Amino acid sequence: MKTSLKPAIAFYYAIYVVTLIIAAIGSFYAPATPWVAADPAVVKTIYSLLILYLLISIPFSLKWLSTSSKKVRKLTDANEKIKRYRRNICIVLGITAFGLIASLLCFYLFKETSFIYMAGIEIIALLFCKPTEKKMIADLFTDEIDEITDQNTTPETDEPIEKNTKNE
């Protein structure tokens, strides 16, 4: 199953690579003064829009991923489940990455340190979105796991059936 998540995992790490490239180029070429001499009201407006984007995009994208995973779980074809889950996780990663990259670019353009804090929040949000095989199985195949677990319990006590491992 790891191979099925490779594109999503590659996209996840590509976001970090792009972030590091932007940070390296920005810190190398950044002058002491801001690149864009913008009116403080414009910077405050852009900052407010990015904060609003951050406050709306992170919780709603994570909630959307949760509800869409519940819908995908109802599908019968395992390959289709994985394909849709991979697409959905890439959408959430893209939404989060947009805020991260926009925050970094605004930091280097306007030299306003509050944009770095927003980038840090976006990086933490990306940690919650990391695609892993364990998370995919928990999101998509919990019904099948529950059925298997139910088959391995006794009906009277609902305790696991113990296998006799001793050779007599």
Image: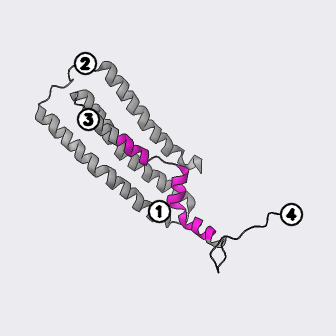
Q: Which label's residue is closer to the chain start, 4 or 1?
A: 1
Q: Which label's residue is closer to the chain start, 1 or 3?
A: 1
Placement of 151 over or under 61, stated as above or below: below
Residue that badge 3 annotates: 115
The kind of residue on which mark 4 rests is: Asn
Could you say which disc has been placed on residue 167 in the image? 4
Residue under the image location 38 percent in, 43 percent down: 124
The prevailing secondary structure element of the residues shown in magenta is helix
In the image: residue 136, left or right of residue 62: right
Q: CA distance from mark 4 to mark 1?
A: 45 Å
Q: Position of residue 25 (x, y in %)?
A: 35, 23
Nearer the observer, 51 or 91: 51
Could you say which disc has been placed on residue 31 in the image? 2
Residue under the image location 33 percent in, 42 percent down: 121
Q: CA distance from mark 1 to mark 3?
A: 36 Å
Q: Nearer the viewer, mark 3 or mark 4?
A: 4
Q: CA distance from mark 3 to mark 4?
A: 66 Å
Residue that badge 1 annotates: 72
Q: Position of residue 117 (x, y in %)?
A: 29, 37
Asked whether the residues under the numbered discs 2 and 1 touch, taking CB atoms below 8 Å apart as contact, a structural biologist would say: no
Q: Report the magenta residues as a range.
A: 122-149
Q: CA distance from mark 4 to mark 2?
A: 76 Å
In the image: residue 148, left or right of residue 16: right
Q: Residues within 10 Å of mark 3 (few under 14, many from 20)?
A: many
Q: Is residue 133 visible?
A: yes
Residue under the image location 40 percent in, 56 percent down: 65
Say which element carries label 2. loop
